[in-house]
Amino acid sequence: MFIFFGIVFTVYGLINYYIIRRGLSIVPAEYKTFFLIAIIFIASSYIAGRLIENIWISPISIILVWIGSFWLAIMAYTFLFLIVVDLFRLVNHFVPFFPSFITSNIEQSKRVVAIAVGVLVLSSVIGGYINTKMIVIKKYSIDIKKNAGELKSLNLAVASDLHLGTINSYEFMYNVSEKINKLNPDVILLAGDIIDEDLGPVIKYDVGEHLQRLKAKYGVYAVTGNHEFIGGAEPAVEYLAKHNINVVRDKALKIGDAFYIVGREDRASRQFSGKQRKELSDIIKEVDKSLPIIMMDHQPFNLEQASQNGVDLQLSGHTHNGQLWPFNYIVEKVYELAWGYRLINNTHYYVSCGVGGWGPPIRTGSRPEIINIKLNFVGEDK
């Protein structure tokens, strides 16, 4: 964990250092000190706010977290646009191609570039913030070549990566619960990262009231994600259980003598708690594989394990599809399936980009989503 956070803080510090150095090159001398202090304060606000809310949830911690959250997106896009500018400058150094009106007045050109970068960054952030409010419902109909007792079909509502906390709070969960309940689901499945590390804001603002409003014929089931473990999995799981969320931890549950729900502990359990999760083969060794098997595994690694063990549908999240464009291209290189639906052998997979998000309340790589899947049990002969 220390290595993980050490790497994160080092990268964060270097990016902010780069932005500060580039900013100081265009700020007039009399404003350099103010600029430096302001950027350091803003860049430190997210970390400070998260630390303070562990001790005292107050307007101070809330303001700091919100400022810092927006800065994460502003920082990312400022860094990316500045890198593009510096790449052009590097190429021009070796192969001069800048027109004379740029090279003849360098200081003015720097200010014009700074304004252009600022407009692009703010446009991206504002547009991304609006986009987070526009939750979409993705509908799928999937045939499972098994019988499920007397059931002919099953209506699933699936959501992942709610990241409930200071940013995604009471109103957010109200909107999500309203949209899910309108689907009239037979089962609600929450595929991890329900709590955004710190449980305090969730308790203070009674976000669980709207978790408790989730209604489905066969109940509401969830798995842990990496953020539950970062903040402490046991208190998070206890809170969810008190609000009618059945957290399935390395277990297989038989529902209505018709189908199974399998929940895998998140792979971050080893990193943050020192406990190795069970092998999938051990979890389902007593499962009747003639019945449909629906599995949740928050992080979509090693997809082949599901098909090798007779799982019919795997549901995952975690990737956010990068959340901020163009990080989706990096995510696509890391995961076999970074977002969306795929059939591999006889196993159906869906990796959600999430209905919430971590850090900045900004989403530019995709729309936040709730998945509505109708499973049709058609039997082996169909």
Image: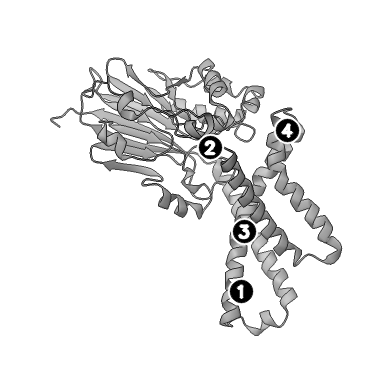
As measured in the structure, the alpha-carbon distance from the residue carrying label 4 to the one carrying label 1 is 42 Å
Q: Find residue 20 and report its horizontal and vertical position in percent.
A: 72, 59
Q: Residue at x 45, y 54 (%)?
A: 329
Q: Nearer the viewer, mark 2 or mark 3?
A: 3
Nearer the N terminus, badge 2 or badge 4? 4
- Front-most of 253 and 378? 253
- Front-most of 283 and 236? 283
- Front-most of 317 and 186? 317
Give the residue type at disc 4: Ile
As measured in the structure, the alpha-carbon distance from the residue carrying label 2 to the one carrying label 4 is 23 Å
Q: Confirm whether residue 215 shows in the render.
A: yes
Nearer the N terminus, badge 4 or badge 1? 4
Give the residue type at disc 1: Arg
In which quarter of the view is residue 16 placed?
bottom right
Q: Tell me the residue that label 3 is attached to.
A: 79
Few, some or many residues within 10 Å of mark 1 (<14, 14–19, 20+): some
Nearer the N terminus, badge 1 or badge 3? 3
Q: Nearer the viewer, mark 2 or mark 4?
A: 4
Q: Are marks 2 and 3 in contact (CB under 8 Å)?
A: no
Indicate which disc residue 89 carries.
1
